[in-house]
Amino acid sequence: MVEAEIGKKAKFAVNRLVLGLLYLLVLAVVGGVVLFIFTVPLFGDIGDLGTAIEMIDEDPLGAVGMIVFWLISIIIIAVIALAIAMNKRFLVPFKSVEAKGDIPKGVTVVMLVALGAIISLVLFIARQVVGLFGGDLSQADPLVIGQAVLDGQFDIVFVGLIFAIVVGTLVIFVADRTREIKEGIKTVDPQQKK
């Protein structure tokens, strides 16, 4: 009985690793395209919003631009997370341990912003925690992990894989709660469609 539960948790961890690496890979590709087109990196963490708010007095136009870019970034982050969460049973090796996602139809821009902001905050906190251990999020880039394996830098591999499991768990957890986010938005703004 205990062995079966441990096996189930190990399968779940492998699934989260796969989903975390997939999320980070898709985010890196989309971020690379955004960087190539707009020459601005796609971070989308809540720290960018804080920086924009701090610079409103000094450079109002630049601050508004940063806020708009942050909003676009978190919408992109939310869309990627929802796409992975909706299709997670097709993307993971151990389908038996995955529950079906509870993602409602008719996701609105307000819901995407709310979902993206929550993910943004979670990734910001994760970035700070990884920073406490002397690492950074570039170690969680799937390409960096692959190169670290080839170079024998197993400390980078370990940090990257742990962070990928954390990202996979957190992002899918938040994305699976989209229905609850929708209900929360209806509580705040009753005009939202049902």
Image: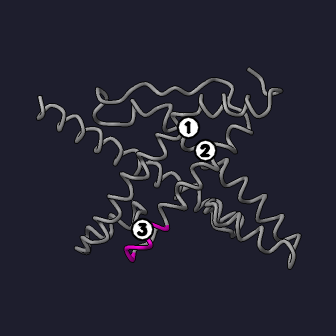
Tell me which secondary structure the magenta stretch mostly adopts: helix
Q: Which is nearer the eye, 153 or 136? A: 136
Say if 68 sits above or below 50 in the image.
above
Q: Residue 105, located in which quarter of the rendered image? A: top right
Earlier residue among tags 1 and 3: 1
Question: Which residue matches tag 1?
Answer: 82
Please identify, in this view, whether the residue under mark 1 or under mark 3 is nearer the observer: 3
Question: Which residue matches tag 2?
Answer: 78
The numbered dot on residue 161 is none
Badge 1 local density, few (<14 within 10 Å), some, or many (20+)? many
- As helix, strand or loop, the secondary structure at mark 1 comes to helix
Q: From the viewer's perspective, tell me whether residue 119 is left or right of residue 52.
A: left
Q: Is residue 74 magenta?
A: no
Question: Which residue matches tag 3?
Answer: 130
Q: Which is nearer the eye, 45 or 146? A: 45
Q: Residue 181, located in which quarter of the rendered image? A: top right
Kind of residue indicated by mark 3? Val
